[in-house]
Image (tube, rainbow, N blue to C red):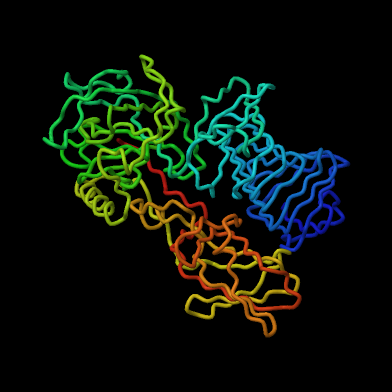
Amino acid sequence: MDGCRFQNDWDNAANWTNGVPTYDITPVIDTSSGNVSIDLDGSEASNALTVNGSGTVTLTGGTLALNGTATLASSSTVTLNGSTLTASYVNGGSVTLTDGATMTVGSTTSAINFGSTSQGTNTLSLTYTGYSVPSVTNLAPGDEIVFPNDSWNTGIQWVENSDGNYTIYDAFSTTNSGDAFVKSVTLAPGVSTSDFSWNNTSYAIVCFLSGTMIRTPDGERAVETLELDDIITVFDPGTSTGTAGKITWAGRRHVTVRRNLPDDEAGYPVRILADAIAPGTPRMDLLVTPEHCLFLNERFVPARMLVNGSSIFYDHAITQYTYHHVETERHAVIWANDMPTESYLDTGNRRFMEREGKVSQLTTTPPRSWKQDAAAPLAVSREQVEPLFRRIAERAEAAGCTSRYTAPELTEDPCLQILTDKGISLTVKDTGHGWFQFPVPAGTQSVRLLSRSSRPCDVIGPFVDDRRALGVLVGDVLLHVGTMKKRLTPHLRTDDLFGWHNREQGEHRWTTGNAVFPLSEKTDEEGVMFVNILSSGPYSLHAGHRAERLPLSA
């Protein structure tokens, strides 16, 4: 941090020495005499952080990873100016996120203020379930609140309070008496709740961009001109021909791309070049959202799983656009630019869309599901999708399509590191067959497993429907202290663990690349810990790798 090592009070220059802070330091910043500004050079780590006084500490750029808790005095503020802060907890005071800042915590009692988004999306990510954020102010389009480890994906509802602020609850809460996701939300000036939508990686937004031509019995019509009760052509599986289908709902929404996220989550539209699938299919370039499905081999396949970087790719030239939904009486195969695709299937996000044209009668129809209501099965398994991906990619290569991406350089080395709860880095020994051992100092209550991480869809291929950032797959964990030998299982038995993905079937669990492993009790003497890594990699050698962007010529 500015090339200095802070021993105690960061605001006291007498305590600064050259070098990099060690993990066992717990810095104390006293703002009683004035505000403090710190430039973060790359990634820095510390055991914990305490901010005293009533001033502001501004962290600019880089990343600060805390092993434990950030404790802020009640009148103090921490401003993240394009910085990333990770911690188990952030308590007290207030935190301002501005110009592309990210705060990832288990939970927080701090007041959160969103600032400028001119340099990127501001993101608050809460990894522990069952906790409420007390207050959020100045929430505006371009800001994000993320609950990555929650299993629900039912959506949210805004409840206006008497003071004009809002509380955010589960969309299907009927009493609004339980724990709120966010207890008090103040929107930025000129912003309304309709400017926001619920987003979950398993919660699809399926739609066409403006200008898409939809087949009707009377010829093609632009999707943005379609309204309630209009007739379009839908596929009849009984005769394998087109038949008339009535539109029961049409909606639209404007999107601004969130450039700091992976392409499939950022909101970039997928461009499918003319003839990419077959001659005349599509007849001209087709732009859809990543989750929109194409009808191939009698199944629906999400467009994101077919992106090959040449004939099907994310169009980075489009950063704002309006998308459109067309819902029919039953979910159906319809034609868009002569490409068989799908009509809208309301899985619960209709409430976030603006209706097109004539207003339909409000209903309380429950969300539909792919399993029970889809016009054809949804194909997301690698066995089903990869052959299609390969066939389309080979067709693009034969046609001389230019690749717009470069593949990441990969490694199988997880680069495993271990830190204690006091921030002490431990020596890790690879003993073979996936087993790693390291000493555990007396008094240790938890250790942190650090490793590389990657998304399978990025390093294997988009035909793998796994967009989790995976660190290492941990199996058995053993602790030897003196003559005592014990098998530790908190990662197999506890849902809310910082840095762990949801539990799966079997005696194993994936980390995110930064996972806390609590010991069952504090060790009174030094011991040895053994961790069995069942799977790891491949990983990109370059953290934050993004495919190289080449000029588009679609």
Residue 498 shown left or right of residue 200 in the figure: right
Q: Is residue 250 above or below residue 530?
A: above
User: Which quarter of the figure is the C terminus placed in?
Assistant: top left
Tally the marks: 0
Residue 78 shown left or right of residue 236 in the figure: right
Q: Nearer the viewer, residue 3 or 425?
A: 425
Give the image location of residue 462, x and y in percent. Answer: 36, 51
Residue at screen point 54% across, 64% down: 492
Q: Residue furthest left?
A: 239
Give the image location of residue 262, x and y in percent. Answer: 46, 45
Give the image location of residue 128, x and y in percent. Answer: 61, 50
Q: Residue furthest top?
A: 358
Residue 469 shown left or right of residue 129 in the figure: left
Give the image location of residue 503, x and y in percent. Answer: 50, 58
Q: Residue furthest bottom?
A: 483
Residue at screen point 16% across, 21% down: 217
Residue at screen point 17% across, 41% down: 278
Residue at screen point 68% across, 42% down: 80
Q: Is residue 410 above or below residue 352?
A: below
- Image quarter of residue 489: bottom right
Q: Nearer the viewer, residue 302 or 547?
A: 302
